[in-house]
Image: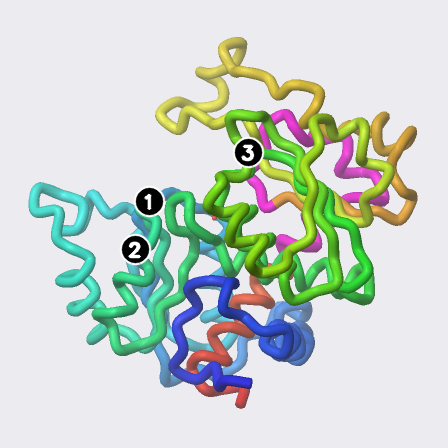
């Protein structure tokens, strides 16, 4: 297994099974710190920089929370318009990250452009962590999802995943890449205009990922051990939820998981994950069912980022 020290975390396509297990093992080791709401001094000599060019609640704040739990320092920006990268100058990724590498020991980046973290990693000698790049990938989210599934179901092998939502989304890409390392099958349900792209399907075939497409969640939910959801209604982020009331598109029933559907058709042990934020594809009354694991996943998000920061900064070898 390759060492994680100094390594960029850009994609799950290049993760081996052993590497997934190593990251999960470090999560297990560090979880008590987060569970007990303690801060340690493991990374007291290290600094994290978060460079977020797109909105985020969970990914940025859980990464920063993880660094605080490990005793490290944090700086960064969450509004690129207030930096030279987002104002009149539109400073390039190259020049920006050539600068930022002098300010921190690890950089977490979210960017609207697919491939931007990989470009940043070319110009920064410190590890770069991809926190979501356009329609590309979202490795830290999907590592969190897989860790949650592994701890809740006892294994990632022998499971059927039902993936519901917009198949062009970065989480869907990362989870399907990751499935190449496990004895798992995916059933994929999404609107035809949001289906898996042909070039991505070709990659999945090359990786021997087992998946099939279905039209309606109601026809296949009974086969699933893990129900993994994303919205198909794309939010208008320029207005608030209150302003949008009454004008919001609603999700067609083919892509909605309700409490009634779970009661009538789902396997009793199946679990639901959603990276959040949600729209109406996952009604709030599902939260009180035994299937809900997205709040467990939210906690695990901090643990996962603690694991990744420890590994790439050499505190877990
Ligand atoms: N899951 C996720 O990526 O959420 P944020 O957009 O809030 O970071």
Q: Disc 3 or 1, which lies upstream in sequence?
A: 1
Q: Does any atom of ligand 1 lie closer than 8 Å to the CB of label 1?
A: no
Q: Disc 3 or 2, which lies upstream in sequence?
A: 2
- Residue named by callout 2: 116
Residue 215, image x and y in percent? 69, 27
Q: Is residue 150 above or below residue 313?
A: above
Label 2, label 1: how far apart the Cα atoms are: 8 Å
- Name the residue: 56% across, 46% down: 172
Nearest the viewer among 99 and 123 is: 123
Residue 181, image x and y in percent? 65, 66
> Left or right: 267 with respect to 122?
right
Q: Quadrant of the N terminus?
A: bottom right
- Badge 3 marks a residue whose secondary structure is loop
Label 3, label 1: how far apart the Cα atoms are: 20 Å
Residue 96, numbered circle: none
Residue 253, image x and y in percent? 70, 20
Q: Is residue 93 above or below residue 239?
A: below
- Badge 1 marks a residue whose secondary structure is loop
- Residue named by callout 1: 112
- Badge 2 marks a residue whose secondary structure is helix
Residue 195, numbered circle: 3
Q: Does any atom of ligand 1 lie closer than 8 Å to the CB of label 2?
A: no
* Contact? badges 2 and 1 (CB < 8 Å): yes
Indicate how the structure is coloured in the image: rainbow
Q: Which residues are magenta?
A: 275-299
Mark 2 neighbour density, 10 Å: few (under 14) some (14–19) many (20 or more): many
Q: Residue 177's image quarter?
A: bottom right
The reply to whether residue 16 is visible in this rendering is yes
- Name the residue: 21% across, 68% down: 100
- Name the residue: 49% across, 39% down: 197
């Amino acid at each position: 297994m390759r060492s994680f020290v100094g390594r960029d975390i850009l994609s799950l396509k290049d993760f081996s099974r052993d590497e997934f297990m190593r990251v999960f093992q470090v999560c297990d080791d560090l979880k008590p710190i987060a569970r007990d709401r303690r801060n340690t001094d493991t990374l007291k000599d290290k600094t994290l920089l978060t460079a977020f060019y797109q909105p985020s609640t969970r990914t940025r704040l859980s990464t920063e929370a993880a660094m605080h739990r490990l005793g490290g320092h944090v700086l960064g920006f969450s509004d690129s318009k207030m930096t030279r990268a987002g104002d009149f100058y539109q400073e390039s990724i190259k020049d920006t990250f050539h600068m930022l590498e002098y300010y921190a020991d690890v950089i977490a980046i979210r960017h609207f452009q697919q491939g931007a973290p990989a470009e940043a990693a070319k110009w920064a000698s410190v590890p770069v962590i991809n926190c979501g790049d356009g329609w590309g990938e979202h490795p830290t989210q999907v590592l969190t999802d897989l860790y949650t599934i592994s701890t809740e179901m006892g294994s990632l092998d022998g499971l059927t995943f039902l993936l519901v939502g917009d198949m062009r989304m970065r989480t869907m890409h990362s989870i399907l890449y990751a499935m190449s390392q496990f004895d798992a099958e995916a059933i994929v349900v999404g609107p035809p205009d949001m289906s898996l792209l042909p070039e991505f399907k070709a990659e999945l075939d090359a990786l021997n990922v087992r998946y099939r497409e279905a039209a309606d969640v109601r026809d296949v939910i009974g086969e699933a051990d893990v129900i993994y959801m994303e919205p198909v209604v794309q939010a208008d982020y320029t207005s608030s939820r209150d302003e949008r009331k009454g004008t919001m598109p609603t999700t067609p029933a083919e892509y909605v998981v309700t409490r009634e559907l779970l009661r009538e058709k789902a396997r009793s042990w199946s679990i639901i994950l959603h990276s959040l934020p949600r729209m109406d594809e996952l009604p709030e009354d599902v939260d009180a069912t035994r299937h809900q694991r997205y709040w467990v996943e939210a906690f695990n998000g901090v643990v996962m980022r603690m694991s990744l920061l420890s590994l790439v900064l050499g505190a877990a070898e």
